[in-house]
Amino acid sequence: MKTSIASAVLLVAGLALAGCNGTLEEIAPTTTAGPKATKPLPEQLVQSMRAKGMSTTAPIMLRIFKEEATLEVWKQKSSGRYDLAISYDICKWSGRLGPKFTEGDRQAPEGFYSVRPHQMNPQSSYHLAFNIGFPNSYDRANGRTGQHLMVHGACSSAGCYSMTDGQIEQIYALARDAFAGGQTEFQIQAFPFRMTAANMARYKEDRNYAFWTMLKEGYDHFEITKVPPKVDVCEKRYVFNQMAADGSTFSPSAACPATTQPQSLQVAYKSYQNTYDAAFKAANGTFKKPTAPAPTIAGLEEAALVADWSRRRARGERVMREPPTLAKPEILVAEKPAPQVLETTVAVVPTPAPAAQQAAQQQAVAPQAVPSKPSMLSLFPFRRAPADTQPVDVAPMPDAPAIATAAAPAAPQTPAPQTAATQTAQTQAGAEAEVMPAAAVTNSPPPETGGLGLRKRLTGLFGG
């Protein structure tokens, strides 16, 4: 039981990493083919081909342009040259402009590929399909990996060129009839865009430009001859319409052998290149703003990022919605910095204290009560003058030092016999002592004369 579960998990992981949205066409095909693989071509298309001098069983060739999202089917005419039979809008292709580097990078391949009868799959889970033959000898020589890269139906892609079901039925029928007519393999030319001077000028600063310039030579040979070019690989690069000397062969990673090329082709290519060079120079010097370049794959480093993203996604990890790039290399959702900022903000908020604790804290920090100062009346008890004493005018208020001196307690002295003059002086001094605190109040009205007026004034000032 455990072995079965483990095998199922490995199969699911393999499906997710494989091309064409994770399908392993050769390993798990559908059980029945049905009539979809044997449908005849529409009569209207057959009549159009006949008008161009093409038979239904004549050889074919496919050209794919990513940026234009176009798949062209070219068919051989009775003259031996090829002509465009029909063109389709690609429903979906994944990745960016540029070649496929590694398995899982979601890139649809670019280059020259061959399809043989055994690569056709009438039992595809994606309606109908054929394997384009990636990796070819060029890809393997340059260390590029991947498998199960298809042209298929179902309009769903993760590394493939996906068509609608109706479109793939016609493309499949065109290939099927060509094989029935004796063609042993047909060529697929996959380009990032139409290799015109204007488009090459738009992408002249791209890191894939050297690779695209190499592909352009094969593109140009077909434009000149209207015959699929002979393709070989040596020194880890494509070479086109080159014939090795007797006894020599092409080896993808070895030095290129001595080769020859038909003189007529050399002359035609030189003329074609001169025209292209003039158009390329004009495209670079034009004042008209060109169409902005489409996104492109930033080499093997970015492809490795996307492949890691694909593997983590296949394992069920929480990855970003879109594949990463060198400009935005984040893979996992958890790597976003937002939660860290939120934690710092929460940490500085104090926890409210219980009500009892708050009351205790308030009582602890409450200011101590300041004892009230004694009233001046308590310091200077009022002494009523004898009835037979005449009212005495109050003298002016002395300065603050005099108040301090008067307020200081006098040393005890032996009472002396009081005479009438002494009693009168004491009465006057007591009156002065009772009115002295009034000097602290500025801008007060002049004091009343007599003991009753003085008492009323002190009572108004100090209470009591």
Image (spheres, helix red, strand yellow):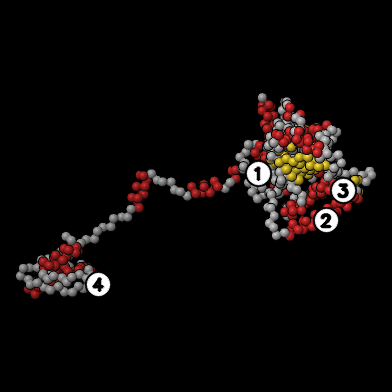
Task: Report the Cα–Cα distance between label 4 and label 1.
Answer: 91 Å
Query: Can you name the residue that lies furthest to the top here?
Result: 1
For label 2, the SS is: helix
The type of residue carrying mark 2 is Asn
Between label 4 and label 3, give the one nearer the viewer: 3
Question: Which one is nearer the viewer's eye here, 210 or 381?
Answer: 210
- Residue 334 vertical placement versus 6 (above, below): below
Task: Give the distance between the C-alpha atoms of the residues marked 2 and 3, in whole angstroms.
Answer: 28 Å
Q: Secondary structure at mark 4?
A: helix
Residue 449 shown left or right of residue 28 in the figure:
left
Q: Nearer the viewer, residue 168 or 245?
A: 168
Using the image, determine if residue 382 lies above or below residue 349: below
Task: Identify the secondary structure beneath mark 1.
Answer: loop
Is 447 left or right of 119, judged from the image as shown? left
Mark 4 vs 3, N-terminal side: 3
Residue denoted by label 1: 323
- Estimate the x, y position of residue 305 in percent, counting from the top left: 68, 45
* In this view, the mark in front (4 or 2): 2
Residue behind mark 3:
255
212 or 400, nearer to the observer: 212
- Check disc 4 and give the amino acid type: Pro
Residue at position x 73%, y 31% from top?
Answer: 124
